Amino acid sequence: KEDIKEMREIVEKETIKKFNVMSVVFLAELIIVTVSAYPLASIDGYVGVIIWLCLFAVTLYTTSKIERFKKNYDIQTCKEILAFIDGKQLTYDETQQEIGKRNYQKIIFAFLAGVTALAVCLAVIFICRHLSN
């Protein structure tokens, strides 16, 4: 029985590590895609746009992998994700509360992501315009 428990812990740690790595990769890709949009678009012709679209496609692929992972492990809200990363499970009541929060959190996160992306893009445009002058 202890061997099974140890194997389960090893698998859980590897799964958590995989999720953490995917999250860091996604964050890096998101920053690169956001910051590189204006500089790549300013390259003559469509070369810059094609490079940016390729970067964007890779980021979307990573996003789909993370979303599939979250769906397989039924983790959607911040509390569920943090509990998963810590290797813990929420109680039944906590899980039911989190299920009720999911729709609101998705709307808030989408709005915040849009505002953040807009702010970063505007900052990059501002910086690039001042550098070119």
Image: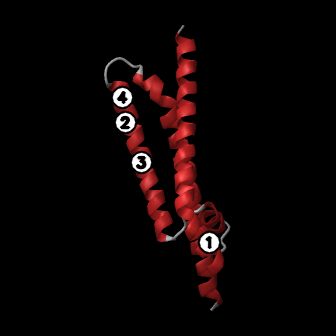
Q: Is residue 20 left or right of residue 70?
A: right
- In three-dimensional space, the C-alpha distance between marks 2 and 3, rounded to whole angstroms, equals 10 Å
Q: Is disc 3 in contact with disc 4, using a CB cutoff of under 8 Å?
A: no
Q: Is residue 118 visible?
A: yes
Indicate which label's residue lies in the foreground, 1 or 4. 1
Q: Which residue is mark 3?
A: 60
The N terminus lies in quadrant? bottom right
Q: Is disc 4 in contact with disc 2, using a CB cutoff of under 8 Å?
A: yes
Q: Position of residue 69 (x, y in %)?
A: 48, 64
Query: Who comes first in sequence, dot 1 or dot 2?
Result: 2
Q: Which residue is mark 1?
A: 97
Q: Is residue 68 left or right of residue 121?
A: left
Depth check: 54 or 73 in front? 73
Q: Amino acid at mark 1?
A: Gln
What numbered label is drawn on residue 53? 2
Q: In the rendered view, tell whether residue 119 sits above or below residue 9.
A: above
- In three-dimensional space, the C-alpha distance between marks 3 and 4, rounded to whole angstroms, equals 16 Å
Q: Residue at x 67, y 73 (%)?
A: 88
Residue 16 occupies quadrant: bottom right
> Which residue is the extreme one toward the left?
46
Q: Amino acid at mark 3?
A: Leu
The C terminus lies in quadrant? top right
